[in-house]
C-alpha cells in the first residue's frame, strides 16, 4: 500500500492528532512493512506512554498489597489505588468513590449486577428488559439467571436502520419490569441510544436501569448523576487503560442493600466459624487481592482523556465517522450497517458482496490495517440482519482521515481480488 504519495488531508479541528499520536508508542509500529493503521478500537484501545509508565513505576517503586500493611509501600500502594478510584469516580460524575466497584471488565460488572442484585430481587413473573443490540455480556448473564429464577426476558427490537424501536416501550415497560439493561452505544451498528429518555421511561414503572457503558464511557462525556441511571458497567482497556480492570458504578443505596458477589479476603469486616460480616462499600464487592497496577494505570488513562477533553474526542470521532461513511460507499457492493452518522459513535460495520468479513480483515491486515471481523459478540443482532458476520472499523482519538483513505483503498483492493 503506498503511503508516501498521498495528498495531506486536514484532520480534525478538535484535536491535535499529531501530538496525540506521538504519545502512543505502538503507533510507530510497522506491520508487514507498512505503518500500522489501527481501526479496532471497539475491541480494545492502544495505550499512551503515561499509562504504560504509571504501571511500570508502580512495580519499580511501590509494589505492595493494598489495605493490609502499615508499612510504607503498602500505604503508598493503597493511596495510589484508591486515588485511581477517585479519578474514575470524578470522570463519570459519581457522587463519591465508594460507588465505584473495581471489576476485571464490563463483563464482570454486568455479571455482578445479575448475581448480586438480580438474585436478590428477581423472581418468577418479573421481567428483565434488554435490547436486540446487546453484547453477549449483557445477554448471557440474564439468560443464565432466568433459567435459575424463571423470570421473563423481553427485548426492545432494532429497526432496519439500527435504532431501537421506541414505540414498543410502553408495552415492554410494565409494573412487572424490574430492570431495563441496555447499551449506551452499540458495538456493531454504532447507534448512540437515548439513555436519559430510556431511563425516565423505565423509572416511571419502577424499573431499575443498568447501562452498559463499555462503548460510551471511552468515547463521550458521561455523567451518571445527570443521566439518572442506577448502575453502569465499563472496561478500562477500551479507554486507554490496561486490561484486567473495569468498574461497576452503582447508586450507594442500591449497592448497600445488595449481598456480596464473591467471598474472600478484603470484602469482610469479620469472619467466624459461624459466619461473616461484609465490609462496607466499595470493598464489600472486591474479594481477594485486586488488580492494583491496572487500577493505577486506569487512573493515568483517565488523566490522559480528561486532559484531551471528552467532548473534543467525541466531536473528532463523529467527524471521522461521517467522513468514513461518506467514503466507504465508493467501494463496490459495500453495505453499511446502522444509522446515519449523526446518530452514531465512532465506528462503522459493513459487509461486502465480494468477500466474507474474515477475508476482508485478512487482506487488510496485509496492508497493515487492523479491523475486526465476525459477529463482535452480538450474534442476535447479526441474526436480525440475517448475516453471519460483518467487518468493522472503529475509531479513537489518534485516528486520522488518511487512515480512512487507506481503509477505502484497501477495500477496493479486496473487491478486485475477490471479483473473478
Ligand atoms: N459491552 C459492549 C457494548 C461491548 O462492546 C463489549 C466489548 C463488552 C460489553 C464487553 O467488554 P469486556 O471488556 O468485558 O470484554 N466489545 C468488544 C468488541 O466489540 N470487540 O471486542 C470486544
Image (cartoon, rainbow, N blue to C red):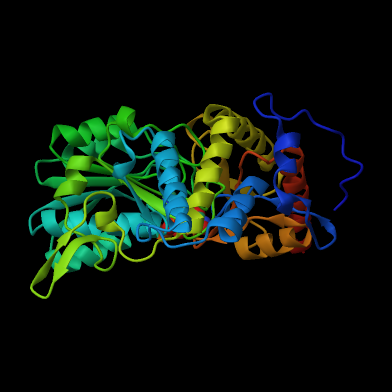
The image quarter in which residue 152 lies = bottom left
Q: Position of residue 219 (x, y in %)?
A: 52, 38
* Residue 172 visible from this viewpoint: no
Please identify the residue farthest to the front as the structure is shown. 71
Q: Nearer the viewer, residue 398 or 279?
A: 279
Q: Residue at x 53, y 27 (%)?
A: 311
- In the image, residue 133 sits, relative to residue 363, either above or below, namely above
| Location of residue 253 in the rendering, given as x and y in whole percent from the top left corner | 17, 41
Q: Residue 111 in the image: state x and y as whole percent.
A: 30, 59
Residue sitting at 45 percent across and 45 percent down? Answer: 84
On screen, residue 368 versus residue 188, left or right, reads right
Looking at the picture, tell me which residue is in the foreground, 164 or 176: 176
Count of numbered tags: 0
Q: Is residue 403 visible?
A: yes
Quadrant hosting residue 398: top right
Q: List the single residue furthest toward the top.
A: 13
Q: Which picture quadrant has residue 85? A: top left
Front residue of this view, candidates 327 and 51: 51
Horizontally, is 182 left or right of 358 in the view?
left
Identify the residue at the far right of this view: 5
Quarter of the figure that contains the C terminus? bottom right
At horizontal 26% and vertical 68% (from top left) the residue drawn is 264
The x, y position of residue 191, in whole percent, is 45, 39
Amino acid at each position: 500500500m503506498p503511503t508516501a504519495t498521498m495528498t495531506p488531508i486536514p484532520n480534525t479541528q478538535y484535536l491535535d492528532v499529531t501530538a496525540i499520536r506521538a504519545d502512543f508508542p505502538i503507533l510507530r509500529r510497522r506491520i508487514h512493512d507498512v505503518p500500522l493503521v489501527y481501526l479496532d478500537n471497539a475491541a480494545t484501545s492502544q495505550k499512551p506512554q503515561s499509562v504504560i509508565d504509571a504501571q511500570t513505576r508502580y512495580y519499580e517503586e511501590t509494589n505492595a498489597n493494598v489495605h493490609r500493611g502499615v508499612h510504607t509501600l503498602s500505604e503508598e500502594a493503597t493511596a495510589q489505588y484508591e486515588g485511581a478510584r477517585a479519578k474514575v469516580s470524578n470522570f463519570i460524575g459519581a457522587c463519591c468513590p465508594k460507588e465505584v466497584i473495581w471489576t476485571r471488565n464490563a463483563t464482570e460488572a454486568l455479571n455482578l449486577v445479575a448475581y448480586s442484585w438480580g438474585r436478590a430481587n428477581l423472581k418468577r413473573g418479573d421481567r428483565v428488559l434488554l435490547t436486540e443490540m446487546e453484547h453477549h455480556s449483557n445477554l448471557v448473564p440474564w439468560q443464565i439467571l432466568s433459567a435459575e429464577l424463571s423470570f421473563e426476558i423481553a427485548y426492545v427490537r432494532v429497526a432496519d436502520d439500527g435504532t431501537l424501536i421506541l414505540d414498543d416501550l410502553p408495552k415492554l415497560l410494565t409494573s412487572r419490569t424490574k430492570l431495563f439493561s441496555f447499551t449506551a452505544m452499540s458495538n456493531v451498528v454504532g447507534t448512540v441510544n437515548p439513555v436519559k429518555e430510556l431511563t425516565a421511561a423505565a423509572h416511571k414503572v419502577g424499573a431499575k436501569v443498568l447501562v452498559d457503558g463499555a462503548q460510551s464511557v471511552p468515547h463521550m462525556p458521561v455523567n451518571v448523576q445527570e443521566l439518572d441511571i442506577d448502575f453502569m458497567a465499563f472496561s478500562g482497556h477500551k479507554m486507554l487503560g490496561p486490561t484486567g480492570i473495569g468498574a461497576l458504578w452503582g447508586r450507594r443505596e442500591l449497592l448497600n442493600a445488595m449481598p456480596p458477589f464473591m467471598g474472600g479476603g478484603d470484602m469482610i469486616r469479620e469472619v467466624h466459624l459461624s459466619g461473616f460480616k461484609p465490609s462496607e462499600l466499595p470493598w464489600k464487592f472486591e474479594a481477594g487481592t485486586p488488580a492494583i497496577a491496572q487500577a493505577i494505570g486506569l487512573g493515568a488513562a483517565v488523566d490522559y482523556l480528561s486532559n484531551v477533553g471528552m467532548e473534543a474526542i467525541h466531536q473528532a470521532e463523529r467527524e471521522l465517522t461521517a467522513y468514513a461513511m461518506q467514503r466507504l460507499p465508493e467501494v463496490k457492493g459495500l453495505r453499511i450497517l446502522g444509522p446515519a452518522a449523526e446518530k452514531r459513535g465512532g465506528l462503522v460495520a459493513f459487509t461486502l458482496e465480494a468477500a466474507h468479513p474474515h477475508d476482508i480483515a485478512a487482506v487488510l491486515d496485509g496492508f497493515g490495517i487492523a479491523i475486526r471481523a465476525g459477529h463482535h459478540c452480538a450474534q442476535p443482532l447479526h441474526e436480525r440482519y440475517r448475516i453471519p458476520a460483518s467487518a468493522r472499523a472503529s475509531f479513537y482519538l489518534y485516528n486520522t482521515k488518511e487512515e480512512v483513505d487507506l481503509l477505502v483503498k484497501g477495500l477496493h483492493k479486496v473487491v478486485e481480488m475477490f471479483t473473478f
